[in-house]
Image (cartoon, rainbow, N blue to C red):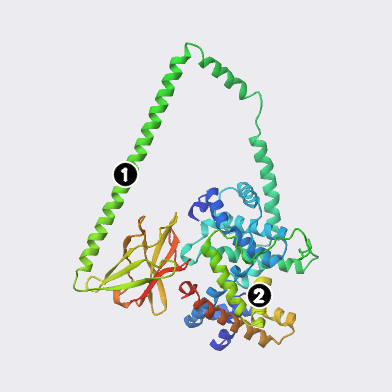
Amino acid sequence: MHLVAGGDSDALAQLFKRYAGAVYSLAYRMLNDREGAEELLNEAFVRVWRQAPSFDARRGKFSTWLMSVARNLGIDELRSRRARPRRSDPLTPDDPVLDPVDDSVDVERDVWHAERRRLIREALRELPPAQREALELAYFQGLTQSEISARLGDPLGTTKTRIRLGLQKLRDLLLSSELGTEIL
Amino acid sequence: MTHADVRELIASYAVGALEPEDTSLVQEHLVDCGFCANLAREASEVAHYLPYAAPSREAPVGSLERLLVAVAGEGAPSWAAVRATGSRASSSQGAWAPDWPAAAAPSRLAVQATGTGKAAAAGRSEALEPRPGRLQLPLSRWLARLKTPIFAPAAAAVVVLLGMAGWNMLLMGDLKDERHQMSTLQSRLAQQTHLMVMVTSDSSVTRPLQGTPLAPSAEIRLIMDGETNSAMLMATRLPPLPVDRVYQVWLGRQGARMPAGRLVVDDHGDGECNLQLDGSVHSYDSAWITLEPAEGGPMPNSPGVAKGLL
């Protein structure tokens, strides 16, 4: 990031090569359309370029910051879409141009990132479905707990409890996995 | 807002699911309450893993080129640009965002960036377009002149001089490399001497760290000397380091963890390093080694290759 802050576009390209897959995956998961996800990917890294001088590694990991930038862009876009007609139709499973997602072949070049992805997805799968759904609606759809309650037809207290218990259980599962040394 | 209220909301806060007014109340509480702030930190650490639950996809072909065109149109990063972006902070920022740089702005900017990028691309392609008749003709004339008997010896002398200059630069580069290697060896020798002194000291204790499945054959010893309040780590047979990566040592105390040193290993996976302490050497209860970028970091970014209780 020091190099990027100094205007080194090669350094930016290196960061892009390392993290673009993760950002694009998150963007696609949130927006469910290729064009929007690609725009978000581009904008997230333009933000990296613009804000590199103010990045302080002592305050947190670059990857955490980058993913939060991407997620916030995604939430803005989702809120904008909810307020206006869709700009483009989402891809459906019948769409012939849909990228096939093969869980058995992870396209991450970094083996550890692939392993991390597998561990997190496994942990999420172990959550009770209602807890997982509440967490996913909050994180990937940017819904507030009130909006989640309305969407699922549950009392607000139930939604709060599901999010709390879901995150706690997810933490316990990750702590007992190989990710435990990261979280401890 | 009471501790109980905050604890009820802390998970929703961490995943950004609170309404703005609740977010403000929780944030006000966290400023003054270290206990709840710690709970919020723990919850946020887990939430930060959620993006990796998205099914994996590769970035579209050409997206890097598009980005580079876009930033070429932006110019070099500057604090002015940071402030400008910060002033366009997004509506989602209030709900959930890390504390450091401003996170997001309305995504219409992506469209702007695209437009700027296309304009920049057009400008760049125009700039790179060869202009026939301006460069090619004079160059061919010069090449023709160099073939004449008068210019041939001078051209040969220039070629020889350039060759010697290049050779000289290569030699200087080799010399610089050798000096660097010598300096590295001297530094390592000094560390090993220090290590020998520590190991033979009556006041030192040695604790092993266990290699994880990522480094099953590694042997690691952490030597702590209470008399001099110093610690060193000695490792053998760690996996070779990828380019631009180092092993980072972490020391733990009562659940907190702090970076204590970077460990560079040789081709055999052997290395040693002094550890930085912020208290009594015997106040630490655990140690880890993780693989990190060369500049290190405040938090582990990879799985541990070794760990142990002290």
Q: Quadrant of the N terminus of chain B?
A: bottom right
Q: Which numbered disc covers residue B254?
A: none
* Up-down relation of residue B218 to residue A143 (above or below): above
Q: Which numbered disc covers residue A136?
A: 2
What element does badge 2 sit on?
helix
Q: Quadrant of the C terminus of chain B?
A: bottom left
Decide which of A30, B82 is in the foreground and name it. A30
Q: Position of residue B186 (x, y in %)?
A: 26, 52
Q: Which residue is labeled 1 in the image?
A: B178
Relative side of B152 to B112, left or right = left
For residue A114, which quarter of the picture?
bottom right
Q: Residue at x 29, y 77 (%)?
A: B282
Q: Residue furthest right?
A: A85
Q: Residues within 10 Å of mark 2 (few under 14, many from 20)?
A: many
Q: Say whether residue B246 is visible.
A: yes
What element does badge 1 sit on?
helix
Decide which of A95, B128 is in the foreground and name it. A95
Mark 2 and mark 1 residues within 8 Å of each other at the beta carbon = no
Q: Position of residue A179 (x, y in %)?
A: 50, 72
Q: CA distance from mark 2 to mark 1?
A: 55 Å
* Up-down relation of residue B131 to residue A95 (above or below): above
**Chain under disc 1:** B
For residue B160, which quarter of the picture?
top left
Relative side of B250 to B60, left or right = left
Amino acid on which disc 2 is placed:
Glu
Q: Residues within 10 Å of mark 1 (few under 14, many from 20)?
A: few
